[in-house]
Image (cartoon, rainbow, N blue to C red):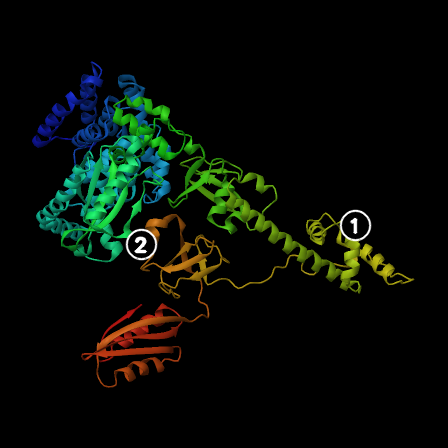
Amino acid sequence: MEEKLIFTEEEKTKVEELCNELRPKIADSLQPDDETKLKTTIEGSINSGLITRDAFGFNPFVEALQTAKIAIDDIGLRRDGVIAILLYVPVLSSSVSIDDVKADFGEGVSKIIHGLVRIQELYKKNPKIESENFRNLLLSFAEDMRVILIMIADRVNLMRQIRDTENTEARHEVAEEASYLYAPLAHKLGLYQLKSELEDLSLKYLEHDAYYEIKDDLNATKRSRDAYIERFIKPVKARLEAAGLKFHIKGRTKSIHSIWQKMNKQHCGFNGIYDLFAIRIILDSPPEKEKMQCWQVYSIITDMYQPNPKRLRDWLSVPKSNGYESLHITVLGPENKWVEVQIRTERMDEIAEHGLAAHWRYKGIKAEGGLDDWLASIRSALEAGNDLEVMDQFKSDLYDKEIYVFTPKGDLLKFPKGATVLDFAYHIHSKIGNTCVGGKINGKNVSLKTQLNSGDTVEINTSAHQQPKLEWLKIVKSSRAKSKIRLALKEIQTKNGAYARELLERRLKNRKIEWEDGVMSHLIKQMGFREASEFYQQIAEGKLDPNAIIDKYQEAYDHDHNLNESKVAESAQNFEFDNPGEEIARNDDVLVIDKNLKGIDFQLAQCCHPIYGDPVFGFVTVNGGIKIHRMDCPNAPELRRRYGYRIVKARWSGKGQSQYAITLRIIGNDDIGIVNNITNVISKDEKLVMRSINIDSHDGLFSGNLVVLLDDTSKLNMLMKKLRTIKGVKEVRRL
């Protein structure tokens, strides 16, 4: 048995402070004996010795109380949610059973904890958490939406606590998950303050220097920024009051994360960001006068300051799809500085700050289906302070139309509800689908007809002897799989038709009977076939006997040529099809993609120019082909982050005869004869071909690009090593 969790004096004090702070906030929702039962249950779990500190050395019960505080203050959770937060760790450690929780605290609490444990099981499948599919799977997988809300609160708390941890690797992983997963979830749920905090803290841990540089710049410019805002607002305020409008004005500085994003997007420094803040004019306007008064403010502002017509954003006439309404203009303010002004009403501002929940509340209509409507209903319930058990009724039918399943590598794929193992196979690759004979769902063998459920891990079994069948079109649900099956069937039909025709031609030749297209066409029509392809297909499928066809062809041929004495057809047993099992030989591709699959169409990416011997990976493009990239390709991190589900493993399977054009960047001292020395190194190697060399000289230094043709990385490394030994060469690198 492990050593039981020991509380430090500081932790004991912290627990007491948090309990005293939380108790009055949820007292009205607690049952009379809740606190006593909680204390008994938690003390028992601590004494069991099954609970230890987490990877950062934090006390899980102190963490739980801190998470509960966020859940109460920033989200609005009450009794069931708070008790579930406090008892999740004891249940996860098996020191308390979920049945005991249900008996002592009710079904609501046990249901939330069950959902938290269930999602913990998803994490064990090592999913790519940065994918949109995983976020949607979490939303659909949670039996109770409070599960997701608790996860967000827990991650916010953890991000606050890990500032000084020595476990930098774990902190980096936690921060990445916050950025990719929890911040977008908080945004979807309308928890904008928590979303902004998660983004800023993630940037702080992942891009430490950039975060503090922006923070210092903001602090350094705060006084002048506030003074400028005041100078801009003062005359505007006077003009608006003179027009008889009711309003208030505020200046809002962008978050550090937003500024960092803009700096990256615009490829500029802090001083290059001109819209560090926006002036927001919020009107207290009756509904019927909203648009009129917004445009009245626009007219007043543009009379005072010169507008930039290219920066006008009219979301009054046509609101954004998420319900956002506002009028944005950029004007040339005092000191010739561009200033963004946002004009909106109180109603519009409420929608902008609190998402679609406010939109539906103002509209006074019930949300019906769709993710945003569903989340809006949840957010409305939170803001209204309702008992959160009513969230059960908000379960939307959105996810009745979609399911999310895992590949063995942890990739998450989306399919229509009712999709089967065969759909999954065709999603991976056409060749996988065409040869699919079944699969495994969560480790159990199943047929290709088996339907998938959200959260399943799916593997595909294939056979070289399998080929698509017409009835497969009734098994699959996705249009992607159906189109691939139709294409495969068409290819099979073409291939079978060619095979059947070749078979007939060969056997006619063996009987020394001349082939004539006109005679065969006449025979095909005589036998009742409208299309020749159908006739040949039936021969290929064994439904028509080739020898019987040849006999009929002989009769038709003799008849068409008025031959009095027909040749006696020899018995079919005297003739055999030469090598009936022969296959067309084909050269193996140099690359093997994923699970030793050969023959897949691929191209070498132009962004990194991989050559034989480079560590590589495959990327499935939108048109179904595969691009091969180097592992250190400059685009690789972005591809993995945004499209991790389209990455496939790749390796070089065998040395081919190809030569690859490689560009080398060479920098060094501009000595006499340096170019001659470089070209001599290349000319001495018979297996190297120089395509071009371009050298520029400046202030005693030269730099240039050298393009050579070579076979593989060993030749490349050898060449780079030789070039570096040349006197005066300072740097040789591959582009």
Element type where label 2 sits in the image: helix
Classify 215 as above or below 513. Answer: above
Q: Amino acid at mark 1?
A: Met
Give the percent coordinates (x, y) of residue 25. Answer: 17, 22
- Residue 191 rendering spot, x and y as whole percentages: 25, 35
Q: Residues within 10 Å of mark 1 (few under 14, many from 20)?
A: few
Q: In the image, 431: left or right of 539? A: left
Q: Is residue 193 above or below residue 540?
A: above
Residue behind mark 2: 637
Residue type indicated by callout 2: Pro
Along the viewing direction, whichever of 396 and 688 lies nearer the viewer: 396
Q: Name the residue furthest bottom.
A: 672
Point out the image quarter for the C terminus. Answer: bottom left
Q: Which residue is mark 1?
A: 527
Q: Position of residue 442 (x, y in %)?
A: 43, 37
Residue 641 lies left or right of residue 156; in this view the side is: right
The quarter in which the N terminus is drawn is: top left
